[in-house]
Image (cartoon, helix red, strand yellow):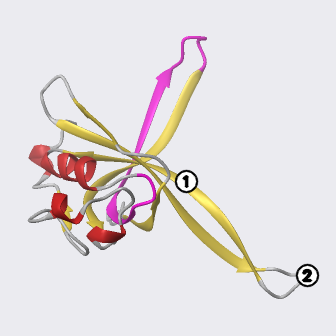
């Protein structure tokens, strides 16, 4: 019996809030994102399509976290390639909680620099631009 598994996620969407950049105790940067992606299905009554939003928590680690935190903002369009991470904890009320989020391996900026909300083109000279791929160097860069 094969033990072959795949844990891969690819999403394209818009940020629902500004990125939250922070540093772990080890000094590694981590950037938290909230990404909205729509799915559509045919409306059985009208024949048109019904759009339904889905929201995903994404974490970016290391130097790419700094770039994502600097050059994206609420409304930015990005593509994320990563994997699902499952975690479990006990809340203050004693209840066991669990969540699934996405650990990004790469984040691609899809907006042109002038299209980014609140951006000034001069701020982005020499910075990551449309189609720029920002990735994590390898598993040794991740804090877990």
* Residue linked to disc 1: 55
Instruction: Reply above or below: 136 against 92.
Output: below
In which quarter of the view is residue 12 placed? Answer: bottom left
Image position of 27 (left or right of 41) = left
How crowded pointer 1 is (Cα within 10 Å; few <14, some 14-19, many 20+) is rated as some
Percent x, y of residue 9: 39, 63
**Sequence-wise first label, 1 or 2:** 2
Percent x, y of residue 39: 61, 71
Span shown in magenta = 74-95
Q: Closest to the observer: 21 or 126?
A: 126
Query: Which residue is at 27% across, 68% downward?
Result: 113
Q: Residue furthest right?
A: 45
Percent x, y of residue 120: 26, 60
Which element carries disc 2, helix, strand or loop? loop
Which element carries disc 1, helix, strand or loop? strand
Percent x, y of residue 85: 38, 46
Question: Does 89 lie within the magenta span?
Answer: yes
- Which secondary structure class fits the magenta region best? strand
Circle number at residue 45: 2
Image position of 39 (left or right of 77) = right
């Amino acid at each position: 019996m094969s033990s072959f598994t795949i844990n891969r996620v690819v999403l394209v969407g818009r940020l629902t809030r500004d990125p939250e950049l922070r540093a772990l105790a080890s000094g590694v940067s981590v950037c938290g994102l909230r990404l909205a992606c729509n799915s559509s299905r045919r409306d059985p009554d009208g024949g048109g399509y019904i759009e339904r939003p889905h929201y995903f928590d994404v974490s970016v680690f290391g130097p790419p976290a700094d770039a994502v935190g600097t050059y994206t903002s609420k409304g930015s369009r990005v593509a994320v390639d990563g994997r699902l991470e499952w975690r479990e904890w006990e809340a203050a009320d004693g209840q066991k909680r669990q969540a699934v989020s996405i650990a990004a391996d790469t984040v691609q900026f899809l907006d042109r620099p002038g299209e980014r909300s609140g951006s000034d083109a001069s701020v982005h000279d020499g910075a990551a631009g449309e189609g720029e791929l920002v990735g994590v160097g390898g598993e040794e860069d991740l804090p877990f």
